[in-house]
Image (cartoon, rainbow, N blue to C red):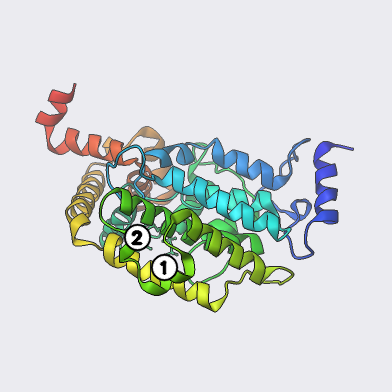
Amino acid sequence: MKVRERIEELEYKILAPFAAKSRDAVRERDESPCDFRTAFQRDRDRIIHSKSFRRLKHKTQVYISPGDHYRMRMTHSLEVAQISRTIARSLMLNEDLTEAIALGHDVGHTPFGHSGEYALKDLIGCYSHNEQSLRVVEHLERNGQGLNLTAEVRDGILNHTGNSKPLTLEGNIVRFGDRIAYLCHDYDDGIRAGMLRPSDLPPNVASTLGTNPSRMITVMVSDIIIKSTGKKEILMSDPVKNAMDQLREFMFEKIYHSPELEPDRKKARYVISKLYEYFMKNPDSLPQEFLDREKRWGLQTTTVDYVAGLTDLYAIKIFEKLFIPSTWAQSK
Ligand SMILES: Nc1nc2c(ncn2[C@H]2C[C@H](O)[C@@H](COP(=O)(O)OP(=O)(O)OP(=O)(O)O)O2)c(=O)[nH]1
């Protein structure tokens, strides 16, 4: 019996009845299974080895061009994976599936975080990073062939945010894991940036979740585990959910929509708009790989794919080269 088959059997013996089982997973296209790794382990590994995942290390979470101790999207994805895996393992759900969804959930994020996303939305009428993440793994990675992931992982990536919920409990864990991770690490980074103090927290947040970021994670994670054990749903108790919602409102006011960060957000939107407009007018300047895809997807989608895939650093570099040639000349 192969190692993978043994793990697949173990999943049936050990995991909760509602856990997703890797033996039942179906890929986009038929493919022979790996001898050692289950389908979900293999999906996780494919995501880790993808270019889009590597680029997350140079994509903004909240602060543009921050110091080394601030989170970028890569660190965010790792923290979402850590939090989500703890919850999955404690509930005897499929940890590998949870990890694959968590690591892949943001691969479609634009440069400059949500500012880049809003810029593209203004330009083309619709753009959602979760839909783009799915597009990346289905149609853009591996020179357009996609990663051929399982339906469970793709569903979790697509539905990690927004109104429709993932079909698996593992996907629903990542929805919570994402929020818990970003609220706590952005709060931590906000303190580091001198934009927040623990004493600024609304009293109900401080008394329910505490004021230390790691304590906040523990409170929310434990609450989900206690509330969801033996259930067919991923739940959070009302008091903790209310405190989490209040923390989110507080973070929007103090950080995500803060006037202090508006100049950076404005610059980011400007860079993205200029790049989009430039490549729409000069498609021949797109890299060959994208030009090849234009025939299938059309110019607008191809330009969006290119601009959305850029890292912050690379977007700035191209912007300077195209629009501020003197800066570009000096940097050479
Ligand atoms: N949701 C949201 N997040 C923002 C905004 N501006 C900055 N951020 C930051 C806060 C978090 O670090 C991160 C949240 O974005 P993500 O793509 O990680 O989460 P997502 O939009 O899927 O979360 P959600 O479903 O809204 O809780 O981006 C904004 O206008 N909306």
**Label 2 secondary element:** helix
Tell me if mark 2 has few (under 14), some (14-19) or many (20+) residues whose alpha carbon lies within 10 angstroms of its own: some
Front residue (pair 216, 161): 216
Residue at 41 percent across and 74 percent down: it is 204
Q: In the displayed structure, does residue 313 sit left or right of residue 232?
A: left
Residue at 58 percent across and 59 percent down: it is 156
Report the residue marked by disc 2.
198
Q: In the displayed structure, does residue 65 sit left or right of residue 31?
A: left
Tag 2 near tag 1, CB within 8 Å: yes
Residue 159, can we see it? no
Residue 206 - label: 1
Front residue (pair 137, 1): 1
Residue at 31 percent across and 37 percent down: it is 286
Figure quadrant of residue 247: bottom left
Please identify the quadrant where the N terminus is shown.
top right
- Amino acid identity at mark 2: Pro
Tell me if mark 1 has few (under 14), some (14-19) or many (20+) residues whose alpha carbon lies within 10 angstroms of its own: some
Question: Where residue 180 sits: x, y (%)?
Answer: 49, 60
Marked residue nearer the N-terminal end (2 or 1): 2
Question: Where residue 111 sits: x, y (%)?
Answer: 33, 46
Q: Is mark 2 within 8 Å of ligand 1?
A: no
In the picture as drawn, the residue positioned furthest to the right comes out as 1
Q: Quadrant of ligand 1?
A: bottom left
